[in-house]
Image (cartoon, rainbow, N blue to C red):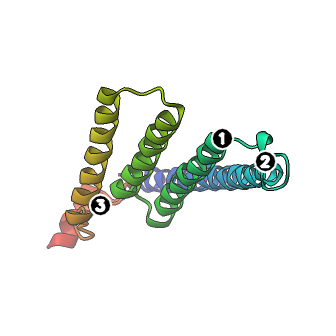
């Protein structure tokens, strides 16, 4: 590989990493804004129920908002961990998925619009996600830093390094 190609690859890789960093910072910022808005909205709608006007407050809406906050927190954690470790951590994504499935199951139960078979299916989904998370934690990926080749390194340089 010529020196100009090597330099061009390094420049493109730098811009790619910067674009990914900007995108993830924007996503994290938007998730934080959404989290703040949802917290303020939940507290705002809860206050009339704590005073005399108890009909303005719906327990189902409050539970739905709190569970939505949990899902947003798990997604935020997944993005922060990706940004921190430069890789997707499977157990964090499975936790976010389990939080989402549990949210939907609990809201369906509160609405009383779910049958016994659906409860079984949703429960199996939760069990599969939790088992997947447990397996992901028990068997983390093995990172071989010496065999990991950068995008800008040529096969000849890698062979020289091994010798």
Mark 3, residues whose alpha carbon is within 10 Å: few (<14), some, or many (≥20)?
Answer: few
Residue at 26% across, 45% down: 128
Do residues under tags 1 and 3 come within 8 Å of each other at their CB atoms? no
The secondary element bearing badge 1 is classed as: helix
Q: Residues within 10 Å of mark 2 (few under 14, many from 20)?
A: some
Q: Name the residue under label 2.
A: 45
Separation of residues labelled 1 and 3 (CA atoms): 51 Å
Give whichever of discs 1 and 3 has the lower sequence position: 1
| Left or right of 7 in this view: 160 | left
Q: Position of residue 135 (x, y in %)?
A: 21, 57
Element type at marker 2? helix
Locate residue 56, reporting x and y percent.
Answer: 79, 40
- Residue sitting nearer the eye, 113 or 23: 113
Q: Nearer the viewer, residue 31 or 148?
A: 31
Question: x and y percent of residue 62 in the render?
Answer: 65, 47
In this figure, which residue is indicated by the disc labeled 3? Answer: 149
Q: Which residue is drawn at 52% across and 37% down?
A: 110
Residue 42 percent coordinates (x, y): 73, 50
Q: Which residue is at the far front?
A: 52
> Which quarter of the figure has residue 29?
bottom right
Frontmost of labels 2 and 3 is 2
Q: Count neighbours of disc 1 (C-alpha within 10 A) and say few if under 14, some if 14 to 19, many if 20 or more.
A: some
Picture disc at residue 61:
1
Looking at marks 2 and 3 on the same chain, the residue that comes earlier in the sequence is marked by 2
User: Are discs 2 and 1 less than 8 Å apart at CB?
Assistant: yes
The numbered mark at residue 146 is none
The relative height of residue 137 versus residue 26 in the rendered view (above or below) is: below
Residue found 56% across the figure and 51% down from its top: 20
Image-based side of 84 in relation to 43, left or right: left
Measured Cα–Cα span from mark 2 to mark 3: 54 Å
Looking at the rendered image, the quarter that the C terminus falls into is bottom left
Q: Is residue 11 visible?
A: no
């Amino acid at each position: 590989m010529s020196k100009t190609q090597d330099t061009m690859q390094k420049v493109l890789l730098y811009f790619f990493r910067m674009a990914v960093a900007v995108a993830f910072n924007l996503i994290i910022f938007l998730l934080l804004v959404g989290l703040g808005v949802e917290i303020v909205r939940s507290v705002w709608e809860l206050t009339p129920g704590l005073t005399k006007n108890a009909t303005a407050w719906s327990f189902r809406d409050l539970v739905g908002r709190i569970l939505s906050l949990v899902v947003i927190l798990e997604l935020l954690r997944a993005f922060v961990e990706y940004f921190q470790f430069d890789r997707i951590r499977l157990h964090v994504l499975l936790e976010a998925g389990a939080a989402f499935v549990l949210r939907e199951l609990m809201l369906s139960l509160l609405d009383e619009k779910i049958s016994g078979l659906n409860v079984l299916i949703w429960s199996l989904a939760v069990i599969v996600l939790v088992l997947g998370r447990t397996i992901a934690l028990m068997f983390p990926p093995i990172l071989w830093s010496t065999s990991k080749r950068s995008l800008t390194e040529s096969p000849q340089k890698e062979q020289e390094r091994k010798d």
